[in-house]
Image (cartoon, rainbow, N blue to C red):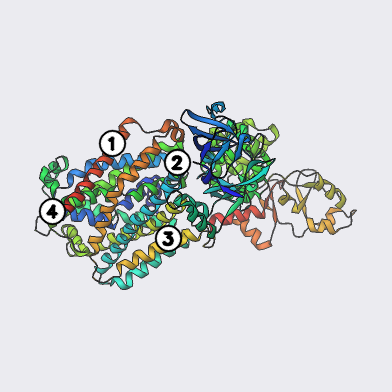
Amino acid sequence: MTLALTELLGAPVFDTAGSRCGRVREVALAPQEDRARVAVLIVRTKAGDRLLPFGSVTSVNGGIRADTSSRDWAPSNSSEGLLLLGRDLLDQQVIDVFGRKVVRVNDLDLHQEAIANRPVLRVGAVDVGPRGAVRRLLKGVVPSGALRALLRRIPLRPIPWDFVDLIETDPARRVKLKISHERLARLHPADIADIVEELAPDEREAVFETLDEQVAAEALEEVEPKVQKAIVESLDSDRAAEIVEEMEPDAAADLLADLPEERTSEILLEMAPQERKEMVELLEFKENTAAGRMNTEYLALPLSANANDAIEALRHFEGGIETVSTVYLVDSHGTLVGAVPLAKLVLAPSDAPLLSLTQEPLISTHSGVGEKEVAELFDKYNLLTLPVVDDQKRLTGVVTADDVISLLRDKL
Amino acid sequence: MKFLKRWKTRILLFFAVVGPGFITANVDNDANGIFTYSLAGAKFGHMLLWTMIPVTLALIVIQEIAARMGAVTGKGLSDLIREEFGFRITFFMMIGILIINFGNVVGEFAGIAGSLELFGLRKYYTVPICALIVWLIVVKGQYKTVEKVFLAASFFYITYIFAGVIAKPAWIDALVATIKPPQKDMFLHQDYLYMVIGVVGTTIAPWMQFYLQSSIVEKGVTRRQYKASQIDVISGCIFTDVVAWFIIVACAATLYVHGYHNIADAKDAAQALRPLAGDYAYILFAVGLFNASLFAASILPLSTAYTVCEGLGFESGVGKRFSEAPVFYWLYTILIVAGAGVILIPNLPLVKISILSQVVNGIAVPPVLIFMLLLVNKKELMGEYVNSRTYNVIAWITTVVMTVLSVAWFWTLRAG
């Protein structure tokens, strides 16, 4: 049997003597114990708000009946550790992880079952559709029988409770209520980014504080630059540094370059020395040149390497996968000599020298070349990656097709 | 070349400074605004000038509250009303806003029809075409580009300042009337009360508060950058009301003193620019009115659809496809189609309708203000950014005065 939260709120409460002692003010979960089961009712009595443990409730329909005396119910002084369904959820925004969007709660469906002759209420779904809306609009205006009949005709748009992610901006409460974003984190980073863009700044901050760094970094790369900047500015600098370290170096550099200088140096200070050095180098390049768009994580091997060496190096490579669609050959001075496409590498016998597999002619560009020219090279030669060299023809980085796509989209 | 480059920098600089506050204030002087101020000047001369200073003060305070709520909470006004006051109150509020804003949309199309009729173009062709243009601008995602054109063209309002000066108004009388309200018995006149409510309603329109707060959120203004927005809001309010003052003075000096006390259509209102542009007054006025109407007609239906959908929890946003946000797009489309449709009714008194919509705005100001005040004074929402006492006093006085004026007007209606 299903009961709506708003039907329960305001329902009369009778204690063990059968006397009516108040009305339901709040329905609360204790997420530390159970994420879905109703743990406590807060009852508004003449003597103030009281906590009625749901274990004492003997029946729910036609008024709440309890088998304890209202004098034994503890006064409700604080709602610590309790998730108040009315205050925290009704009319608020939550994340629908299944539908991958932010929705506003119209009502909650509570499933009622009986265990050992005692009623148990569990949150079944969040109602974001017209049924909840109409119920709330007409409740108390239309007789309840007629209202129920009407509501049955209205389609339900439920989101199962397991697919609902709550947003809580208070960090202390987040811990007490065990609010995490495990389910959100399983979505594609681009979907997380879309969701985050719809939230208010404080809520974005809350999400980025709780997400795992790796996921946060991937999602942050997909967020539009204006919002990206606001998020990083709102985070503590050590948290920001953790996330920025996990980002693709070129994306991270673009982001840091947009921040106020003071903020950038705060974040850089918190970063690991190796990553900091790399980032400082990238930051020195102008953003609209090949160097400003390039990634410094790439795979370069000596001239003597064979296909097997390359596959082995790939296994141990830690950078983003889009940069390894080409493996580069450099001589002892670091000068770029050749480029081997991943496909050729996979098809070649394992002892084939890499020098025999190189793509001819070798297309590369200088670090000072403008981004328009870079895009033209990609178009002309149908490239996936483009190596960037310095004045001495040494390999310094790689521009990938996804960087060029973002660049072109900005101009559209 | 150098000259061009310098101008380019200047224009860019101007757009960098112009923010949501200035844009909102500019849209405030829409077709409805121009008609209302013109009629105020034509019908009552300088007798409504006293409203300008208190209205500006109230406008600054109210707009600043909306902007501050946007910057601090990062949420729109209808979102906040929903989260703090629940579904039922929000529902009725949104229905009210929908009806009031529809009146304003009709007024904008009246402006489009009126301005193009000055060129001899009949409304049966122009209004549907403009409605289609407005609809396409937004649905095709071109609004941001077009906004700059509108903004640049809205400098037409400055012509009213010149027109006011050239018309040689009775300066002393105008200045005295700005500080001193007329005799008490003026307030017993039904027409006068109607006009006062209209002037306040067109200046402090309810839709502006929703629109401004959303724009602030959309622009990503946060607590820290808030000071800049404050200046943007204040300068916008002052600019819009200085223009309003000159429109009234210009109309008083050209129409009122010569005994033309009514404005029935755009042709009458255009007379106010005669001292400045002579026989070209029509063209100047028509272009300006057309721009103002089209600008507001692109903003109002969109802003309304956003407000209602956010409050009631429907998907919204021009970035979404029609199938993803059907309610949003339907609302937007219906507001435009119906708004333009009303104007196509033959022999419609366009200016009268436009002014009626502003009086309704004025009557709706107190409820919207009450909600804003309740929200902005919530500590758990605004923290240290709750209203100061001065702000509360000014805003509550505005609420009370508007309520009293509305009640008084209804009372004069009953008395006949």
**Label 4 sits on what residue type?**
Ala
> Could you tell me which secondary element the residue under label 1 belongs to?
helix
* Rendering coords of residue A109 (x, y %): 58, 48
Q: Amino acid at mark 3?
A: Tyr
Q: Residue B202 placed where, x, y %?
A: 27, 51
Where does label 1 land, which residue? B394
Q: Amino acid at mark 1?
A: Ile
Question: Is B240 left or right of A44, judged from the image as shown?
Answer: left
Q: Which residue is mark 2?
A: B84
In whole angstroms, how far apart are the C-alphas of marks 4 and 2? 49 Å
Respond whether the residues carrying marks 3 and 2 are from the same subunit. Answer: yes
Does label 3 or label 4 sit earlier along the sequence? 4
Q: Position of residue B227 (x, y in %)?
A: 40, 36
Residue position marked by numbered label 4 in the rendering: B253
Residue A258 seen in this snapshot: no
Decide which of A250, B411 is in the foreground and name it.
Answer: B411
Marks 1 and 4, how far apart in space?
32 Å
Identity of the residue drawn at 36% across and 67% down: B130
Which residue is under mark 3? Answer: B332
Q: Nearer the viewer, residue A46 or B77?
A: A46
